[in-house]
Amino acid sequence: MPAHHPIMSRGFLHDLDYSVVQQCMHCGLCLPTCPTYDATQREAASPRGRIALMRAVADNKLEVTRVFGEEMYFCLGCLACETACPAGVDYAHLFDMARAEVERVGVLARPKRNLIRQVTVRWLFLSRGRLRWLGRAMRLYQKSGLQTLARRSGLMRLLPKRLRELEPLTPAISDRFTPLGYQTARAGEGPQRKVGLVAGCVQDIAFADINRDTVEVLEQNGCGVVIPPLQECCGSLHGHNGEWELARALARKNLDAFGAENLDAVIINAAGCGSHIRHYDRLLADDPGYAERARIWSAKVRDISEYLVEIGFRKPTPSSRPTKTRLAYHEACHLVHGQKISRQPRAILASLPDYEIVELPEATWCCGSAGIYNITQPEMSAQLLERKIRHVVSTGATTLATANPGCALQIITGLRLRGMAVRVAHPVTLLAEAYRAEG
Amino acid sequence: MNAIDPTHISRLVRLLGADRVLTRQEDLITYSFDGTPILNEMPGCIVFPDSVPQISDILKLADHHRMPIVTRGSGTGLSGGAIPVPGCIVLCMVRMDRILRIDPANLTALVEPGVITAKLDEAALPHGLFYPPDPGSMRISTIGGNVANNSGGLRGLKYGVTRDYVMALEVALPNGDILRTGTACVKDVAGYNLKDIFIGSEGTLGVITRVLLRLTPKPRAKKTLLATFASTSAAAETVSAIVAAHIIPCTLEFLDRTTIRCVEEYAKIGLPLDAEALLLMETDGHPAVVEEESAMMSGIAREHGAVEVTIAKSDEEAVRLAAARRTAFSALARVAPTTILEDATVPRSHLAEMINFIQQTAEKFKVRIGTFGHMGDGNLHPTFLTDERNHDEIHRVEQAFTEIFEKAVALEGTITGEHGVGLAKKKFLPMVIGPVGLEVHRRLKQVFDPNGIMNPGKMFDEQEGRDGAERK
Ligand SMILES: Cc1cc2nc3c(=O)[nH]c(=O)nc-3n(C[C@H](O)[C@H](O)[C@H](O)COP(=O)(O)OP(=O)(O)OC[C@H]3O[C@@H](n4cnc5c(N)ncnc54)[C@H](O)[C@@H]3O)c2cc1C
Ligand code: SF4
Ligand code: SF4
């Protein structure tokens, strides 16, 4: 594997522009918004504590220790601290660099952890083909009745405890994946805007319908859509889990696959991916072959709701349905904190004729999904999920909108465990349904 | 590095439980600073008591072995009050965060010191009450820290500061004794007013363990105005004229030209970039009075040369206008890596002179200063935008704030209106309190803390500094 930088010698945190670390003035205003500080009331589990530790590493006052590594992986990466920070600290970047440094030094290396990382981060999520293959296998498992059988027969009890707890989290696999290679057929007047859709990986396998709904809504709003066939996973999983070089490799593949130069916008409907791919410019800033293209790409990336509001999406016509469904909105961390997008999905939801919006308490508080956090930190994740579900229940809503597949999976699991009949849907799906209902 | 004897650590662990005593290097680093720029020091350990008897036991142990104690709330202080003394025990109060009682009949709240300021305000709201002192850090600062620093906020002119709301205190003294001072009575003259000695004592006399606070009925209406001026003196005269007209606004906040530009750059509110000064004014109370007062304030501002006056017509507009002041600190803080927020304060009548002096001083020492502040109570926040790694610039920054403090004192003001002395302003304290004042401070400290374990070296040195620098 090539080194992160040709000139890199000392480590990710050392090589970081020092002003990024220094920008934190340790005012503490981020503390009340940090779920891990809230749970522990310990500074080392707070944003400013973590930044202080990173700075201590950069200053050679602290070695990268196991404890350091654990704190960096106890962090959710929810970026609530960025929203609260008056000084504009770029926590997202610090977080990625700190984890990359933890992996570089290898302080958390353990045979089991290494194997899991090898299989998931370094193998599975590097290829859409492998992901889809796994998706098909899981679909078979779910559809064939094997899953029900396994659950009923007590076969599950044979699995190690950790895996058994995860089994309910396995997503219901979509019947069809996203139609890669799709291109809007040119209709009469021809579309005014040409956009490319990022299919995502979890979105593609578990929520392919959301991708279809996205295409439909974009076409309804005068966009021609392409889904470039050669696109790969966006690399956010790798970037946030210390695999900086793999993240860069995936970014290059996607730049090649899209040719963003010829598009009006690159559309993404998964919040977690969106907040990562917006930063391809920074990820590849020192790559002479890609820096310029990455810059163009980053300037064109739009979350679906952001784009729809930007182009003035068509509001669905009022419906004749007498009663309205109660709808609550959970703000995915990587949309509201990572991309500062909150007004736009709310504008879409407000345009839906059949729904009445009720405010979800703590709507911007992390649900505990946080990428693969629910796998790596099951306890903290479960606490956060519990808190989220409690709030959802308190609203009496029967539909919950959210714009991130990870959040959706997590919350669906939480609702299922409590036997709650709340539908979880992406705002764009609800908009697509409203258009369809117009007849 | 860990200066605390292992046997003392084991004692602490026995007293509190293992998870309430932190000694790992990674933890020590994260408690080596507070909100104060540049300064830091490593503690010996951090402990999290959750009851008064535990605090009493910790203090007895520390007093017996002469181990320094630094009490800490949320560590947002801006003068270094919660920065460790090398090898000290940091007594972190955040786990004692219960609101014990809200008494709507007597308009009081009884709280533990770790309660977050904003949470108290939220808890009072359902009773139609509120807790007025609102430091900019209120979403994370603790009541204990507020009392120990006698913190102010944006509503000082009308509602006063923390001191005006403390009715009674419970304090653990360094020998472990528990002192109760004050009552729930509005009037109480039994004995010395000891509670006032602890308000603003910055953790140097004892540990505040319980606080009885006064609450106030929430005003029914509020009106927000924003005015811009072509000169600082016009803004200052407007403020004086408003007060002379017997209007006491709840907010009278000021932004200077540097701050206005940074705010506009950051928040794009639509502020005029050529304005020299901006005033955000708010009046609250009975709806009819609020209506009348806001009209009068707008008239006074125009008479005194305001270029533009906007009165918010809706809640949303009020929020938009208030954003000019609310984002001031954020807008400045992102301009440079190191932000030093000062709080020189002068009597209202000298505000224009002080603000102009600050601007001249910035030019003289070639440093960047954005000034905003609480115009109603004369409390200014000259904010230095610098880089701690630029030693030459930091030196000039120090020269500049020294001159600013001297000027504030010359104008019968003070070096700190609300952030406290701590470490950051220690060497300037004698400038304000004089040699007799310093001597009384030392003797008072002796009375409560004869072994000098409570936050030693903060505010003043117990012994005269060798270089005699403090006696100016
Ligand atoms: C962004 C920002 C904005 C701010 N705005 C304002 C403002 O508008 N007005 C203002 O006045 N201040 C302001 N401050 C300063 C600071 O927030 C206040 O001084 C606050 O009261 C400190 O509370 P804390 O809980 O963080 O205390 P800490 O910083 O932890 O401690 C402050 C001092 O109190 C002592 N102490 C804490 N708890 C106790 C206790 N239980 N018993 C005895 N001593 C104790 C400590 O030893 C220390 O000396 C601001 C700070 C920041 C970072
Ligand atoms: S990313 Fe989330 S969990 Fe991590 S420090 Fe920031 S607020 Fe806390
Ligand atoms: S809010 Fe920003 S500057 Fe303040 S402590 Fe947190 S990260 Fe640092």
Image: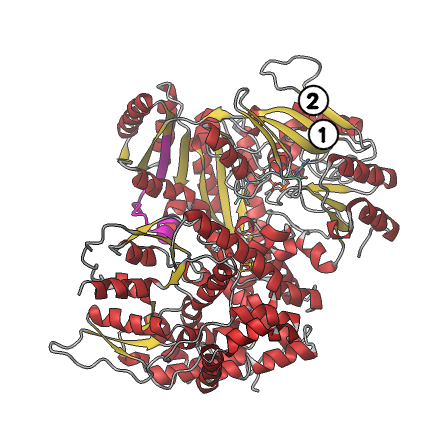
> Which residue is found at the position 79% from the left and 33% from the top?
B174
Determine crowd level at label 2: few under 14, some 14-19, many 20+ residues with C-alpha closer than 10 A.
some
Image quarter where the C terminus of chain B lies is top right
- For badge 1, the amino acid type reads Val
Q: Is residue A132 left or right of residue A226?
A: right
Is the same chain shared between marks 1 and 2?
A: yes
Q: Is residue B422 above or below residue B437?
A: below
User: Which of these two is toward me, A100 or B378?
Assistant: A100
Q: Position of residue A192 (x, y in %)?
A: 18, 73
Q: Magenta stretch containing residue B265, yes or no?
A: yes
Q: Position of residue B95 (x, y in %)?
A: 66, 43
Q: Is residue B267 left or right of residue A122?
A: left
The quadrant in which residue B196 appears is top right
- Magenta residues, start to end: B263-282
Q: Is residue A325 above or below residue A94?
A: above
Q: Quadrant of ligand 1?
A: top right
> Mark 1 falls on what kind of element?
strand
Chain ID at mark 1:
B
Q: Magenta stretch containing residue A44, yes or no?
A: no
> Mark 2 falls on what kind of element?
strand
Mark 1 Cβ and ligand 1 under 8 Å apart: yes
Instruction: Name the residue that disc number 2 marks.
Output: B181
> Which residue is found at the position 72% from the left and 30% from the top?
B171
Contact, mark 1 vs mark 2 (Cβ under 8 Å)? yes
Residue B387 seen from this side: no
- For badge 2, the amino acid type reads Thr
Q: Is residue A268 left or right of residue B121?
A: left
Instruction: Name the residue that disc number 1 marks.
Output: B171
Q: Position of residue B1 (x, y in %)?
A: 80, 57
